[in-house]
Amino acid sequence: MNNDSLVKDFMNIFKEDEGIYTFFAPGRVNLIGEHTDYNGGHVFPCALNFGTYALVRKREDSKFRMVSKNFGNLGIIEADINSLTYSEEDDWANYPKGIIKTFKDAGYLIDKGLEVLFFGNIPNGAGLSSSASIELVMSIAIRSLFSLNIDMIEMVKLSQKSENEFNGVNCGIMDQFACGMGRKDHAILLDTNTLDYEYAPIKSDEISIIIANTNKRRSLADSKYNERRSQCENALKALQKKLKITCLGDLSEEEFEKNKYLIQNEIERKRAKHAVYENQRTIKAVKALKEGNIELFGKFMNESHISLRDDYEVTGIELDTLVEAAWESGAIGSRMTGAGFGGCTVSLVRNSEIEKFIKKVGEKYEKEIGHKGDFYVASIGDGARQV
Ligand code: GLA
C-alpha cells in the first residue's frame, strides 16, 4: 500500500498536512481450532499481510472525525470523545468509537479529539477479521498519540471487550489476539483459557496457505454464532452437575465420552463434542507440525471441517463444496475458517501445485454453486504496528 497516496487523501479530506501518523493492523486466518475460543480451548491463527491502515492526527478540541476509503459514500462520521454511544447509522465507525470509549472507561487518559482516515484491503465480508483489525489499529494509534502505558495483550483484551460490549458481538478473543500479536511466518498456538501462547514457524518454501473466498455474504452469522455459544454454555452447565470443570476446554475426549450422558439435549451434546474434540485436535495438530509431519497436520484440518460440518453445523453448501474440491485437488489439508456460514476456507497446498489447485477448485466451485470463488495465496505477516 502506498502511504503517500493515503496522506494525500487525508490532506484532501481534513485539509491538514502536519502531525499525521500511519498505523496498520492485519487481518487473520485461523489454521485450526474453530469455535474453541469461547469454550476455553486452543486456537492456531496467523496474521495476514493485508489489513487496515489508519492515518491519524490529534485535534485540539474533543471532536472525533473519521472517514473510511472503503465506505466513501458514508462521508465523515463525527462524534465527541466525551459522549460516545453506539449508533446504527454510524455503521463501521462504531468500531473505532467503541475502542476510544472502552479505553477511557478502563482509565486511560484520552483528552483530545482525532481525525482518522481508514483504508482496508481485506476482502469485504470474508470473515478474515476486518473488524478486529480496525479495533487493533485504533488501539495502537491512541496508545502512540496519547503516550498510553499499555501492552499489546491488554489492548487485545480491551478490543475484545469493546466488540462484546459496545458493538454487541459476542466474539471470543482469537481475532483480536491474532491481529495484535501476529508474527511474520509464524502461527500462534493460544490457550484461550490461560492466554498462554507460543509461536510455531510455518515454512513457506515448501507449502502455501491458500485462502478461498465463497463470496457468500455471512447472513445470519451473528445470530447463529450466539446460538452456538449458548448451546455450549448449556452443555457445560449440564456437565458441571458432576464434573469440576470451568470450560469445555478442560475435558479430554475420554472424559467427554464417559460423561456426555449428562447432556440430555442431543443438539447441545453434538456442539459440546465438537468443542472438546476440536480443542484436543488443535493441540495434536500443532504437535505434528512441530515434528515436521505436515501430512498429519493436514489430516487434522480435514477432520476439523467434518466436525464443523456434522456436529457444529456451521458450514453450508458453499464452504463444503470448496473444501471437498480442495480435498480432491491435492490439498494437504482444507477446512472452513472463522465463524462459518459463508466466508472463507483455508487450505495447505504444495508450492509446485498452487496454480493447478486454484484452477481445479475454482472451476468445480463455479460449476456447482453458480458464482465464482476468489483465491489468495496468504503471506503471514506481523501484528499491529506503526508504519
Ligand atoms: C469468529 C469470532 C472468533 C471465533 C471464531 C470461530 O471469528 O470472532 O472469536 O469464535 O469466529 O472460531
Image (spheres, rainbow, N blue to C red):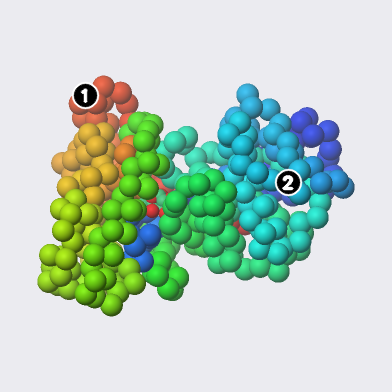
The answer to which quarter of the image holds residue 342 is: top left
| Circle 2 Cα neighbour tier, 10 Å, few/some/many (<14 / 14–19 / ≥20) | few
The residue nearer to you, when weighing 182 against 308, is: 308
Residue 105 locus on image (x, y percent):
67, 59
Residue 238 in view: yes
Q: Which residue is mark 1?
A: 367
Residue 64 locus on image (x, y percent):
75, 42
Residue at 70 percent of width and 58 percent of height: 104
Tell which circle, 2 or 1, labels the residue nearer the N-terminal end.
2
| Circle 1 Cα neighbour tier, 10 Å, few/some/many (<14 / 14–19 / ≥20) | few
Task: Residue type at mark 2: give it.
Answer: Ser
- How far apart marks 2 and 1 lie (CA) works out to 52 Å
Report whether 217 appears left or right of 140: left
The image shows residue 179, relative to residue 328, as above or below, that is: below
Q: Residue furthest right?
A: 60
Residue 44 in view: no
Report how many numbered discs are placed on residues in the image: 2
Disc 1, SS? helix
Residue 343 locus on image (x, y percent):
36, 39
The answer to which quarter of the image holds residue 35 is: bottom left
Task: Residue type at mark 1: give it.
Answer: Lys
The residue nearer to you, when weighing 346 against 137, is: 137
Report whether 214 appears left or right of 137: left
Residue at 26 percent of width and 42 percent of height: 315
Point out which mark residue 83 bears. 2
Disc 2, SS? loop
Report whether 117 appears left or right of 125: right
The N terminus sits in image quarter = top right
The image shows residue 334, relative to residue 5, as above or below, that is: below
